[in-house]
Structures are given as structure tokens and as C-alpha cells.
Amino acid sequence: MNVSVSLASGEPIYQQIKEQIKRQILSGELRDGEPLPSIRQLAGDLRISVITTKRAYDELEQEGLVASVAGKGTFVTEKNKEAIREVKFKRLEEQVKSVIAESRSLGLGKKDVIELFELLYGEANE
């Protein structure tokens, strides 16, 4: 697992950690059942507070992407397929909203966008 933080980014450190781990899980770089570094180990490696690392892990657990097992550590959940699908679906929704806004700014109607989508979707399947 590769995680780095930037104190100059303006994004909270726990959020940086969470997003990097989430991205690695969603991309398949971190697989089901794979252990994450201990909270203390990651905090030491990044030279940050254990509390900050714990917050990132807690939020990942709340999203269903990791699970903590007392005395054993934190693992990528083996049952995270639905959670991953939901996160990806939410990202897709945001992208579609962006396309709709851009289409409206260009004066395109719903019919034009649907025709374009159908054309491009057909090409992607070939």
C-alpha cells in the first residue's frame, strides 16, 4: 500500500489518507481480505498522529470498505463489492450531472445528449 500526505494541500490529512486507500481498493490494487498497515505503523511511517490515522480508518470502515478485527488488524472487506459498486455509481452520477450541466451550457437538448450517448455507447461495445 502506498500512501503519502501533503501538509500544504489544504485537504485534511485524514481525508488524504482515506481517499488514497479508497482509490487503491476501488482500483483493485488492494484486494479483498488484504491487511492494511496497523494504525500505529501508518502513523509512524507518515509521521502523523495516531488519531488522524484512526479517523481515516474509521471512515473507511463506515463506508464498508474495510473491517477491523480486534487483535488482528484492519482488512479490506471481503464483502465490499456492494459498497464499491455504490461508490462507483455515485461517482458516475456526479459525472452525468456534469455532462448535463455542460450540455445545457452548449444549448443541447435532452434528445441531442441521448443520441450522442447512444452513438458513443454503441462504439464502446464494438
Image (cartoon, grey):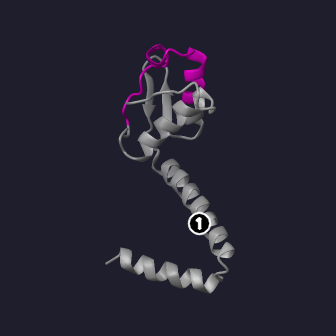
- The residue drawn where x is 60% and y is 26% is 55
Q: Give the image quarter of residue 41.
A: top left
The image shows residue 112, relative to residue 99, as above or below, that is below
- Looking at the rendered structure, the kind of residue marked 1 is Val
Magenta segment range?
33-57
Is 51 in the magenta? yes
Percent coordinates x, y for residue 96 in the rendering: 59, 66
Which residue carries the number 1 mark? 96
- The residue drawn where x is 49% and y is 40% is 22
Percent coordinates x, y for residue 52 in the rendering: 59, 21
The image shows residue 50, relative to residue 85, as above or below, that is above
Q: Image check: 122 left or right of 22?
A: left
10 Å crowding of disc 1: few (<14), some (14-19), many (20+): few
Instruction: Give the main secondary structure, helix, strand or loop, of the magenta stretch.
Output: helix
Q: How many marks?
A: 1
Secondary structure under tag 1 reads: helix
